[in-house]
Image (spheres, helix red, strand yellow):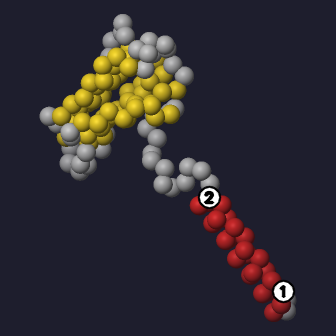
């Protein structure tokens, strides 16, 4: 191979790598996206003094996850989802990062979401009717 052919191949290789890098940064859902604990779209954020509960909905399913305000050591956390007329689905324990996700088929019924971290808590009342 002569030096011109080597130069052309290396230039082509660099161009392909640059294009691939640009496509990776421009694609939707790149590395900045938050990790998805629940499927569907986020419909509510329920903040409280020591954390927050994220609520997602897809079809007739409702999913919730509780996150502490300050991550680190293990804390008492809980999250629950209850459809009107049914029993709640609960995840409770000592966690470092999050409680849940808990998923429930609610259909077209109203749901109540509860979450707590340490001494702080939130209850949504009947929502998503």
**Does dot 2 land on a helix, a strand or a loop?**
helix
Which mark, by number, is residue 99? none
Q: Is residue 98 left or right of residue 24?
A: left
Q: Which residue is drawn at 44% across and 12% down?
A: 109
Whole-percent x and y of residue 69? 25, 45
Which residue is disc 1 drawn over?
Answer: 5
8 or 81: nearer the viewer: 81
Using the image as rendered, state which of residue 98 and residue 110 is in the foreground. Answer: 110
Does 35 sit left or right of 99 as displayed?
Answer: right
Q: Indicate the quadrant containing the N terminus: top left, top right, bottom left or bottom right.
A: bottom right
Q: Do the residues labelled 1 and 2 touch (CB within 8 Å)?
A: no
The percent position of residue 39, horizontal first and vertical second, equals 50, 33
Query: Which residue is at 67% across, 71% downward?
Result: 18
For the C terminus, the quadrant is: top left
For disc 2, the marked residue is 26
| Residue at (67, 65) in percent of width and height | 20
Q: Which residue lies furthest to the left in this view?
A: 119
First in sequence: mark 1 vs mark 2 = 1
Callout 2: 10 Å neighbours few (<14), some, many (20+)?
Answer: few
Identify the element where label 1 is drawn: helix
Position of residue 18 in the picture relative to residue 35 (left or right) = right
- Tell me if residue 49 can be seen: yes
Residue 110 at x, y percent in the picture: 40, 14
Q: In which image quadrant can residue 66 be found?
A: top left
Q: What residue is at 37 percent from the left and 10 percent from the top?
A: 84
Residue 82 visible in the current orientation: no
């Amino acid at each position: 191979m002569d030096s011109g052919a080597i130069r052309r191949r290396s230039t082509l290789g660099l161009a392909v790598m640059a294009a691939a890098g640009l496509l990776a940064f421009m694609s939707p859902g790149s590395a900045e996206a938050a990790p998805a604990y629940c499927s569907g779209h986020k419909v509510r954020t329920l903040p409280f003094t020591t954390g927050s509960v994220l609520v997602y909905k897809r079809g007739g399913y409702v999913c919730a996850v509780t996150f502490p305000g300050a991550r680190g050591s293990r804390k008492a956390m809980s999250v629950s989802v209850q459809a009107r007329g049914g029993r709640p689905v609960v995840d409770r324990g000592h966690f470092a990062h999050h409680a849940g996700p808990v998923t429930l088929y609610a259909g077209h019924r109203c749901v109540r979401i509860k979450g707590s971290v340490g001494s702080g808590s939130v209850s949504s009342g009947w929502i998503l009717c």
